[in-house]
Amino acid sequence: MTTKRIPVVLVTGFLGSGKTTMLNHLLRGSADTRIGVIVNDFGSINIDAMAVAGQVDSMIPIENGCLCCAADSAEMDAMLARLTEPSLGIDVIVVEASGLAEPQSMIRTLLSSELEHVLYGGLVEVVDAAEFENTRERHPEIERHVRAADAVVLNKADRVPEPELTRLLEALARIAPGTPVVTAEHGRVDPGFLFDRGAGAPVEERFRQLSFADVCADEHGEHGEHEWGEHLHAAYESVEFVADRPLDPRRFMAFLDSRPAGLYRMKGFLHFAAPGHGEKFALHAVGSYLRFQPSPWAGGEARTTQLVMIGAGIDAEALTKELTGCVAAGPDAVGDHHMMGVLRYVRDRDEDRLDVWDEDRDE
Ligand SMILES: Nc1nc2c(ncn2[C@@H]2O[C@H](COP(=O)(O)OP(=O)(O)OP(=O)(O)O)[C@@H](O)[C@H]2O)c(=O)[nH]1
């Protein structure tokens, strides 16, 4: 009898490209496959783990730091050993890396796993169709990430017109010739694109089996002046904000409108003081894109605001001060209509008819 080997699929992609959205889609759409998840956020408030909680068979959140730096192979093995515990019956493990993770370094960690029932299942890079060209300009190393991938998901196809999508597909084909690319909206990819469905099916044939030599070739070889130290997060930092008292929606929208240009990504949950709008508002801002999603608070969940902001050259102290200034002055200070600014960015049923947040704002 051979030991069942459990594939570990890495999901990487720049900040806000849609990794968590895709993961949630996979978790919802794979009833016949038990998926174990390792979720990694940049920063210690693990917003992504909160976003996938409840949908998953077994999850390990990694707090405080980026997986590609924080976990060495022994730590990774300890996490994988927990998830591959036979009693859990997990068929595949998906590792969602932080938006600033260095794929090669994570592949290297996985390849050095000493667990015999773990099999490297390949790297899937999620690309944001609307932001890719901008990101590539600022961070040409994104191309290296695409090249490291076994498969690419060109997500947010709904946010670009058809000719632009075709151009992006051509660009990806030039960057990584032969790598399969699928376009997706809201991360809706066929789970079969990432792993074989059903218990323990082999994945070896789909993903080329990498060796250390491959990883190092890209690191130092023809593409490569790259040094491990040059991680994307060298240029980025994250700021966290937590408030126990509810925020004034007008002040918060004013804060968003005057946000510093380097603030690329914001995510988290908000508690507003407006009467009739006491739900929990999830916030996602990526580049010029902004969205709020209201949902009920879970029973017993503390009504707090928790935000993570990620950017380059941002002033943590100033941001914290400004956000602290958004706390509502008192229960009567906010009227129902003060939520208008927020509600404008609430996800529409068919998702597309949203105002795009000051799209033409200068970077
Ligand atoms: N219009 C549109 N929005 C999307 C799509 N996919 C994801 N989003 C939205 O983009 C925002 C970011 O998505 P996430 O799934 O959180 O992205 P992420 O890659 O996990 O983000 P980080 O963990 O911060 O790197 C959310 O508001 C999503 O609802 C898509 O295909 N189209």
Image (cartoon, rainbow, N blue to C red):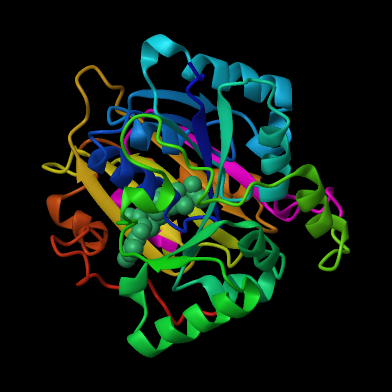
Res 102 visible? no
Image position, residue 39 (x, y; %): 49, 34
Is residue 221 on the magenta stretch? no
- Specify start and end residues of the magenta stretch as a single range: 227-256
Q: Classify residue 343 as left or right of residue 107.
A: left
Q: Residue at x 61, y 45 (%)?
A: 238
Q: In which quarter of the view is residue 255 placed?
A: bottom left
Res 345 visible? yes
Image position, residue 310 (x, y; %): 58, 51
Taking 213 as reference, is 161 above or below it?
A: below
Image position, residue 357 (x, y; %): 36, 70
In the rendered image, the quadrant that contains the C terminus is bottom right
Q: In which quarter of the view is residue 163 placed?
A: bottom left
Q: Residue at x 87, y 62 (%)?
A: 221
Image position, residue 228 (x, y; %): 83, 48
Q: Classify residue 194 as left or right of residue 239.
A: left
Quadrant containing ligand 1? bottom left
Say which of 37 and 116 sits in front: 116
Residue at the outermost top position: 87
Taking 161 as reference, is 64 above or below it?
A: above
Q: Residue at x 51, y 26 (%)?
A: 5
Say which of 8 and 275 sits in front: 8
Is residue 237 on the magenta stretch? yes
Taking 258 as reference, is 205 above or below it?
A: above
Q: Residue at x 29, y 46 (%)?
A: 25
Residue at the outermost front position: 1
Q: Classify residue 177 as left or right of residue 220.
A: left
Q: In which quarter of the view is residue 200 placed?
A: top left
